[in-house]
Image: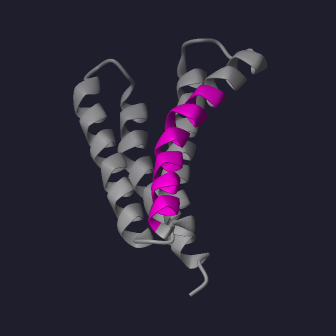
Amino acid sequence: MRLLKTLVIVVAALASVPLLNELGGALAVVLGLPSGGNARLAWDLGWLLVSAFVAVWLPARWSPRWPRGLAVGLASLWIGAAAWAAWNMGSDFPAWFVAAVLIGVPVVAGAAAWLGASGRTR
């Protein structure tokens, strides 16, 4: 049963990434943000960081098995994806955005792992 709960939490963590980013996009439309430009890019960056936080925090806080290992694994996955994206973005995005992704994702993932683990009862 604990293994099944762990699996459900990992699936929820992975599913939260596109769901939260989609929510951010939908809210941008509702709020009337333009589809391009620096304001929208900053908005999307914020939702990217929120989704990274949630994806790492969920298993760190709620997984009955291997919470730290799962949090570190998902944080590593996120950091690797951010590095890969920054490498492949080239000049498609402004330098501030690429730098924010490279700095923000590890900071947010680390904070999520720490906060998730600190909220657990031992």
Which of the two residues, 102 or 47, is positioned nearer the viewer here? 47
Where is residue 74? Give x, y as percent.
Answer: 38, 54
Q: What residue span does the magenta drawing correspond to?
A: 3-23
From the top left corner, tell me how far across and down residue 88 is, in percent.
23, 27
Taking 90 as reference, is 5 left or right?
right
Residues 5 and 38: in front is 5
Query: Would you place residue 64 above or below residue 58 in this image?
Result: below
Q: Describe residue 57's horizontal placement relative to residue 79 as left or right.
A: right
Estimate the x, y position of residue 85 in percent, counting from the top left: 30, 32
| In the image, farthest residue toward the right | 31
Above or below, comparing residue 49 to residue 107 in the picture: above
Number of labelled discs? Answer: 0
Instruction: State left or right for residue 45 relative to residue 83.
Output: right
Q: In the picture shown, does residue 27 fall above or below 6?
A: above
Q: Residue at x 51, y 39 (%)?
A: 15
Give the colour scheme of this rendering. one colour
Residue reaching furthest to the front? 1
Does 61 appear in magenta? no
In the displayed structure, does residue 109 sit left or right of residue 33?
left
Q: Quadrant of residue 86?
A: top left
Whether 6 is among the magenta residues is: yes
